[in-house]
Image (tube, rainbow, N blue to C red):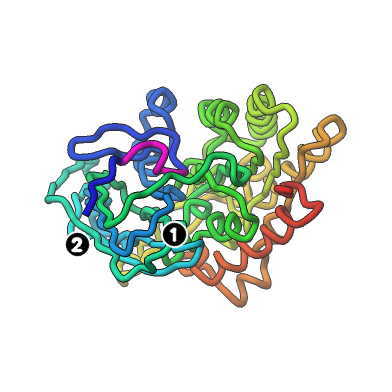
Amino acid sequence: MLTIPITPALVRGCLSLEQGARGLQPHRLPLWARAQCPDQQLAMAESEPAGVRIAFRSRASVIELDTVPTRFVYLGVPARPAGVYDLLVDGRLTAQASATGADTVTFDMATGSVTKQEVGISTLRFAGLPERDKAVEIWLPYNETTELVALRTDAPVEPFSEGSHKVWLHHGSSISKGSNTDSPSASWPALAAAQGGVELVNLGFSGSALLDPFVARVMRDTPADLVSLKIGINLVNADLMRLRAFAPAVHGFLDTIRDGKPDTPILLVSPLHCPIHEDTPGPGAFDMEALAAGKVAFRATGNPAERAAGKLTLVTIRQELERIARQRGESDAHLAYLDGLDLYGPADFAELPLPDALHPDAAAHRRIAQRFADFAFADGGPLYPG
């Protein structure tokens, strides 16, 4: 077995690869951006490597990856499943594995305390791969932090050639990150990227698609050929701002991206259908009755009457985003709009309901991906890669 140095050229989809206690940790926000927001939720979300993969060409039939995962647990909330590593050969899912052990960070929401328990290094082994030149990708789990300790193969490897695919930079919420789908390559952005033949950089941050200025600057400065923004659900369930602040914040976010990408195609996407927040403002909260029954579910705690005072709902956000896109479109020919209900609407909810009242399941991720790709990446579509 050959020990292969883990270099930035082999790790795709992250914006920063930093030395951790035992290995290299992919981050989806650079250090300077993380320093501007001490929020614990964002820190967890950006450190979970959604869309990040180790990618190379090789004739190797055996691959070993040493990792140190970190899993996050909330007291009183059922634990999430262990993260899955997807091995793709020439774009086809070939094998899956999970780390046998993981560091555990436990949050006590009642006291605010945080504790951490550390374990050793886990080794994932993929064997029996075809002994021919092939593209290999190991997609890292979207729901746990991963330190990359060592990579070993039984044949030399070469990084993917740069510029072979257009780069699609996407920003969204936990749904974009992959929540409730089966594995990292089965999130709707990953599936849509595969169909569109583009290289994904996924800035989906659970609970944290909040029009933060530093995220706009990161998107401005990150090399990309195609850009999309899926905005709305977190602004409602975080109860972060009122209608008065919303439109200027969207304009400011888009203006910042345009400062560095004046002609890059941008697709603005409004929220998917989510009954608990269609007409009821946030904040969102755990459904305590569901938790008592051992199930994770969410509910809206706002008062619909407060819409008159400017509290945001998904209906309001869709109306505003469509208006903003129409207004900006008069002078920006490279901006397009997609109604999130065209990806997942009331009829889809009736057929494929949200298991926890907030996040789509794997079948819904596949449907959303297909519809997004058919609209955005098709010949003549707003993000057509050519």
Position in image of residue 354 (x %, y %): 52, 67
Residue 74: % across, % down: 27, 53
Q: Is residue 314 above or below residue 326?
A: below
Q: Is 191 rendered above or below residue 56? A: below
**Residue 296 lies in what quarter of the image?**
bottom left
Residue that appears at 68% across and 72% down:
347
Is residue 49 at all visible to an observer of this figure?
A: yes
Q: Which residue is mark 1?
A: 133
Label 1 to label 2, Cα distance in Å? 30 Å
Magenta-highlighted residues: 6-12
- Crowding near the residue tagged with mark 1, few <14, some 14–19, many ≥20 C-alpha atoms within 10 Å: few
Is label 2 in a helix, a strand or a loop? loop
Of labels 1 and 2, earlier in sequence is: 2
Numbered-mark total: 2
Specify whether residue 289 is in view.
no
Query: Residue at image x 36%, y 62%?
Result: 288
Residue 370: give x, y in percent of width and height: 65, 65
Which sits in the foreground, 355 or 369?
Answer: 369
Residue sticking out furthest to the bottom? 351
**197 relative position to 109: left or right:** right
**Which mark lies nearer to you, 1 or 2?**
1
> Which amino acid type is shown beneath numbered disc 1?
Asp
- Going by the numbered disc 2, the residue's amino acid type is Thr
Name the residue: 28% across, 40% down: 5
Whole-percent x and y of residue 359? 50, 61
Q: Which mark is residue 386?
A: none
Instruction: Say which residue appears at 37% left-offset and 53% top-offset.
Output: 140
Pointer 2 residue: 100
Asked if the residue at tag 2 contacts the one at tag 1, i.e. Cβ–Cβ closer than 8 Å, the answer is: no
